[in-house]
Image (cartoon, helix red, strand yellow):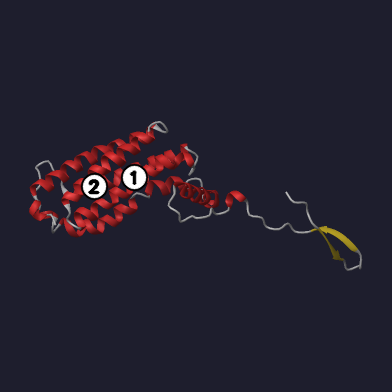
Amino acid sequence: MAAAHLFLIRARSDRWIRSPAPSPIVTRADHAPPSGCAASSWQDLLQFSQFCSQAFLPRMPSWAPAIGLTLFPQVGAIAARFITEREVETWFKTLVKPSWCPPNWMFGPVWGTLFTSMGYGSYLIYKELGGLNENAVVPLGLYASQLALVWAWTPIVFGAHKIGWGLVHILLLWGAAAAATTASWFPISRPAAYLMLPYLAWLTLASALNYRFWRDNKDKSE
């Protein structure tokens, strides 16, 4: 730490007294924003996440990460609702469905519950690993990837009516993202991994439904 500078202040009695100069504001090196934050490399993304964590999270209440990470998956669910509400009573109603297809009213509550459980699981991983750091790149990176994929399924199937592409998409989501996320979470927090199991079961059902929709409604797929 640099030695304190001294400067002279003229007193009213025309005496000179010594007083320590105010210390200059120094930005801590570990709080400085990393160069190239917009770069696509994992290292730059990690540095940027660490900077955000150090700069903002200390100012948050202790409960904020738990609430924020738990509710974050609902962002995509809210956006998807605007698409599904319009299509359920029009295009989706015309599809040939298997007898074991759940009723329409069940999808919203089930997806809302699954999004909440996986969101809380991501918080358990975040907490166990001590925040956003290099150890969190794989487990939370896989989680973010599968979350982006599941958000994209509704616009593909209900928005664009691409049932075949939706099938490819959901199979990729199940195997390469959701299952991989669960496997990466298991050594870190078993409760977090267990919270993903109902989601995997529902994705299995959704994949089977997507296949039947594609097989039985090829004339309604654009």
Which of the two marks, 2 or 1, is nearer to us in this view? 2
Q: Residue drawn 34% across and 53% down?
A: 75
Q: Is mark 2 on a helix, strand or loop?
A: helix
Q: How many labels does the image show?
A: 2
Tell me the crowding category of disc 2: few under 14, some 14 to 19, or many 20 or more residues within 10 angstroms, Cα based.
some
Relative side of 113 to 125, left or right: left
The answer to whether the residue labelled 2 contacts the one labelled 1, judged by CB atoms less than 8 Å apart, is no
State the image coordinates of residue 108 (x, y, percent, origin top left): 24, 49
Q: Residue drawn 29% across and 47% down?
A: 112
Q: Is mark 1 on a helix, strand or loop?
A: helix
Relative side of 52 to 27, left or right: left
Query: Which residue is at the front of the view, 212 or 12?
Result: 212
In the rendered structure, which amino acid carries the disc numbered 1? Thr
Residue that mark 1 sits on: 116
How far, Cα to Cα, is label 2 from label 1?
Answer: 22 Å
State the image coordinates of residue 36 (x, y, percent, origin top left): 50, 55
Tell me the crowding category of disc 1: few under 14, some 14 to 19, or many 20 or more residues within 10 angstroms, Cα based.
some
| Residue 9, image quadrant | bottom right
Viewport quadrant of the C terminus: bottom left
Residue that mark 2 sits on: 169
Q: Which mark is residue 79?
A: none
Q: Residue drawn 21% across and 58% down?
A: 159
Q: Check the image and report above or below for 134 versus 190.
A: below
Relative side of 6 to 58, left or right: right
In the rendered structure, which amino acid carries the disc numbered 2? His
State the image coordinates of residue 129 (x, y, percent, origin top left): 47, 38
- Indicate which disc, 2 or 1, sits on the residue closer to the N terminus: 1
